[in-house]
Image (cartoon, rainbow, N blue to C red):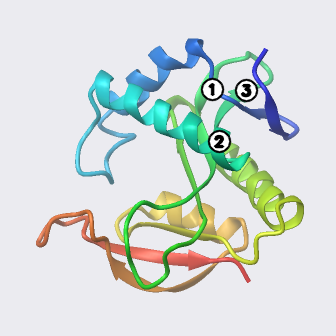
Amino acid sequence: MSTIFVETPRLVLRQWSEADQEPFVLLNLDSDVMEFFPSTLTGEESMGQIARITTHIDQYGYGLFAVERKDNHQFIGFTGLSHPQFESYFTPCVEIGWRLSRENWNQGFATEAAKACLELGLQTLELSEIYSFTSVHNLRSEQVMIKIGMRKIGLFEHPMIKEGHFLKQHVLYKTN
């Protein structure tokens, strides 16, 4: 049984399990899911990401949690809090992020999970602020940021994206 960090009416946000590996690899191979990332991820890259995520959770007690639907116990992606691994004018910081399988879009799951993670971060962990960011083209994720009550504070050029790449410019949101 995986450690549960957060529960919502429809979701469980928990530690990752071995059973999450295959669906996570498939999620990261989906070009629609990865549309606003430089590329899809190989199986090896996805496994490396799981290792980094679980190490982060072990180190901080929070992280990008595996998201499971309560109605069918299906792994649908991740949502949670992490520390971006790049330098910018707003880092170091804690970021809220999410990635869900395409079949689970447009059902309010990202918003539901993100609201619960914001509450965890601000109330339980007593973080003073939380950031979120995405490509200026990713209007779906930007809408989640708005729905969970974050405010847009500007734009920035993501330092890990090549100059001239259409994903270089990002929107930046913040709590309070």
Q: Position of residue 67 (x, y in %)?
A: 67, 33
Labels 2 and 1 touching (C-beta < 8 A) = yes
Circle 2 SS class: helix
- Measured Cα–Cα span from mark 3 to mark 1: 14 Å
Q: Position of residue 87 (x, y in %)?
A: 37, 73
The answer to which of marks 3 and 1 sits earlier in the sequence is: 1
Location of mark 1 (residue): 16
Tell me which corner region of the image, top left, top right, bottom left or bottom right, holds residue 159. Answer: bottom left
- Quadrant containing the C terminus is bottom right
Q: Is residue 106 visible?
A: no
Q: Position of residue 80 (x, y in %)?
A: 65, 49
Q: Position of residue 111 (x, y in %)?
A: 69, 53
The answer to which of marks 2 and 1 sits earlier in the sequence is: 1
Q: Is residue 118 visible?
A: yes
Residue type, mark 3 in image: Arg
Labels 3 and 2 touching (C-beta < 8 A) = no
Residue at position x 19%, y 66% in the image = 166
Circle 3 SS class: strand
Residue at position x 43%, y 76% in the image = 171
Location of mark 3 (residue): 69
Circle 1 SS class: loop
- Quadrant containing the N terminus is top right
Location of mark 2 (residue): 57
Other-residue count near label 2 (Cα within 10 Å), few / some / many at <14 / 14–19 / ≥20: some
Q: Is residue 119 above or below residue 159?
A: above
Residue type, mark 1 in image: Trp
Other-residue count near label 1 (Cα within 10 Å), few / some / many at <14 / 14–19 / ≥20: many
**In this picture, residue 140 sits left or right of residue 121:** left
**In this picture, residue 8 sits left or right of residue 101:** right
Query: Which is closer to the viewer, label 3 or label 2?
Result: 2
